[in-house]
């Protein structure tokens, strides 16, 4: 996760912690963090400002779902807020 944070920080031209959404989701995928379309929409809804996403906050909302992961697989998902499911 630290590599993802470092890379997205370098892409954040204004150094305000925002990076283009497309770049953010591409970086996640390249690091093996495949999110479902639903989880991507949840992150966009919560953390996007225009076409950029606040990547530190978005990364903080991503976790491995150990309940649904298969052996030797990491199933990445968006965490709940205040006990409510990550939903649209």
Image (spheres, rainbow, N blue to C red):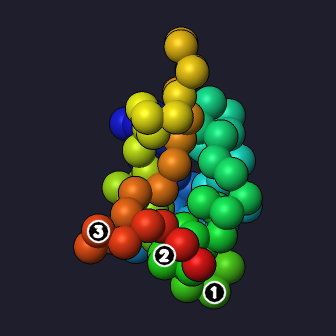
The answer to whether marks 1 and 2 mark residues whose Cβ atoms lie closer than 8 Å is no
Label for residue 1?
none
Q: Is residue 10 visible?
A: no
Marks counted in the figure total: 3
- How crowded pointer 2 is (Cα within 10 Å; few <14, some 14-19, many 20+) is rated as some
Q: Which residue position holds label 3?
A: 83
**Could you tell me how far apart the alpha carbons at marks 1 and 2 are, in whole angstroms?**
10 Å
In terms of secondary structure, where does tag 2 sit? helix
Question: Which residue, given by chain and number where applicable, does mark 2 sit on?
Answer: 47
Quarter of the picture containing the N terminus is: top left
Q: Earlier in the sequence, mark 3 or mark 2?
A: 2
Instruction: Give the left or right position of residue 1, taking residue 41 as reference.
Output: left
Label 1, label 3: how far apart the Cα atoms are: 27 Å
Q: Decide: is 68 above or below 77.
A: above
Residue closer to the observer: 72 or 55: 72
Residue 19 on image: x %, y %: 57, 65
Instruction: Report the front residue among 42 and 84.
Output: 84
Answer with mark 1 or mark 3, whichever residue precedes in sequence.
1
Q: Residue at x 53, y 13 (%)?
A: 71
Find disc 1 in the rendering and name its residue.
50
**Secondary element type, mark 1:** loop
Q: Residues within 10 Å of mark 3 (few under 14, many from 20)?
A: few
Residue 22, x across and y down, in percent: 73, 61
Q: Nearer the viewer, mark 1 or mark 2?
A: 2
Q: Residues within 10 Å of mark 1 (few under 14, many from 20)?
A: few
């Amino acid at each position: 996760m630290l590599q993802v944070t470092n890379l997205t920080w370098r892409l954040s031209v204004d150094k305000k912690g925002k990076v283009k959404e497309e770049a953010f989701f591409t970086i996640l995928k390249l690091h093996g963090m495949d999110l479902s379309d639903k989880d991507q929409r949840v992150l966009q809804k919560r953390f996007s400002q225009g076409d950029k996403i606040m990547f530190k906050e978005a990364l903080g909302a991503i976790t491995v779902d150990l309940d649904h992961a298969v052996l030797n697989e990491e199933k990445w998902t968006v965490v709940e807020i205040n006990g409510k499911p990550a939903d649209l």
